[in-house]
Amino acid sequence: MKNSKSIGNEDFDKEVVVKGWVQEVRLLGGISFLILRDRFGTVQITAPKKKIAPELMAQIAAVSRESVVSIQGIVKQSNQAKAGYEVIPSTLTVLSIAQAPLPMGVIDKVSVEYDTRFNNRFMDLRKPENRAIFEIKSLSLQLLDEYMTGQGFVEMFTPKIVAAGAEGGASLFELKYFDKKAYLAQSPQLYKQMVMSTGLDRVYEMGPAFRAELSDTIRHVSEFISFDAELAFIDSQRDVMDVLEGVTHHIFAGVAEKAKDHLAVLGKDVKVPKLPYPVLTYSEALQMVNDGGIKLNEGDDLGTEGEKLLGDIMMEKGYDMYWIMEYPEEAKPFYIMEKDGTPYSYSFDLDYRGQEMASGGQREHRYDRLVARMEKKQLDPKDFNYYLSAFSYGMPPHGGFGLGIERLVVKMLDLPNIREAILFPRDRNRLVP
């Protein structure tokens, strides 16, 4: 079997079998054209009435759009065909008939609402431009694996049904686990820290994370793929930042080099951010936002508008990707290390064109200080005994980060909504398909 990408000059005047979806049929009296679509593109099937059996011509005329077919025929060079060749058919086998009318068009130049698209996601992803997003997302994950294993990291998989949330708060999905109360994991944070006490001193995970956020925005969903990493025996959070800087640069450079065909389908290009990424403290970022006209007080979250403004300022300076570090410790979870003698913490965000991509920092590895942090956050250490025990018997200094894969892909490709990069999105209104 051949596909639209694998047919070449060497196949001219040879018989091939091609399979795919019927994108279009054009009947022009003495000649008929069938456009066959597969994963890689389209094949023009040309059926001159004088050369093709009447039964086959009738089949071509009758087949419905989006039916799945197998076509056997001879490849002929053609200056008129878009690909430089056409297939003259000898047989057509219908493998699956598509009903009519279609729930939505594939090649029709008609805008379709999000609900219609996601209710019929199987059809929506037949559009080459939508499918290209997932080819690029897959490549991004391969590049991520490539970089992390090259840096000596071990891939791990942690539970997604947990007894306590790493972040806590109202964004937890509660569920009944036999006769116990449990939650869907917000992140693998507590588990990857526990692993730092085992000798597996560099670990990463790619897996689902869940947030019961009530936001109906283009940036928030209830289930997403999170890329998390943790490394031990660090001297400072800069060691962690170096890993995140390296892996994101590797992804951008790899997509720009290896995904040219998919980017062309999308009409996009990827600009690789400059190295090294510039570093701003939280206080410096706050001052820049205030100078730009959004008035915030020390300790305030930058917010969506503040992040956008800061992104515009940094892009004017020639930087798409940049760090914001040393956030107020009050704004950070209990496991983040405080910067002694200050109201700040050893923490950072990695922002890209005005949007947070990743968050991380140095963790509090000292047992007594960690318990004190928990109590300061009004958490009961007894609820975290399984986690704290790993800190009681020798825990090295460590740090890590979490990054949303879909958020990175969406921003890299300048897509309008995070749901574009999720096969079957989940949000407060969508549970099927």
Image (cartoon, helix red, strand yellow):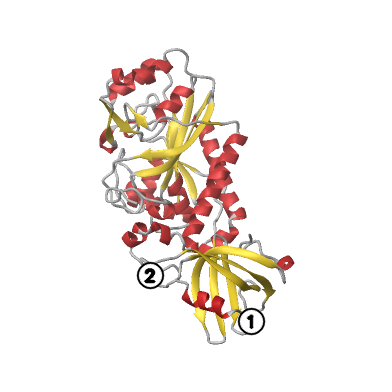
- Horizontal placement of 206 versus 102: left or right? right
Residue tagged by mark 2? 100
Q: Residues within 10 Å of mark 1 (few under 14, many from 20)?
A: few
Would you place residue 328 above or below residue 224 in this image?
Answer: above
Location of residue 98 (image quadrant): bottom left
Q: Position of residue 178 (x, y in %)?
A: 28, 27
Residue 421 visible in the current orientation: yes
Mark 2 is surrounded, within 10 Å at the Cα level, by few (under 14), some (14 to 19) or many (20 or more) other residues, namely few
**Vertical order, 392 against 408 (above or below):** above
Q: Which residue is mark 1?
A: 51
Q: Amino acid at mark 2?
A: Ala
Identify which residue, 295 or 156, lies in the foreground: 156
Residue 99: x and y in percent read 39, 67
- Viewer-nearest of discs 2 and 1: 1
**Real-space Cα distance between discs 2 and 1?**
30 Å
Q: N-terminal of the two: label 2 or label 1?
A: 1
Residue at 43%, 21% in the rendered image: 365
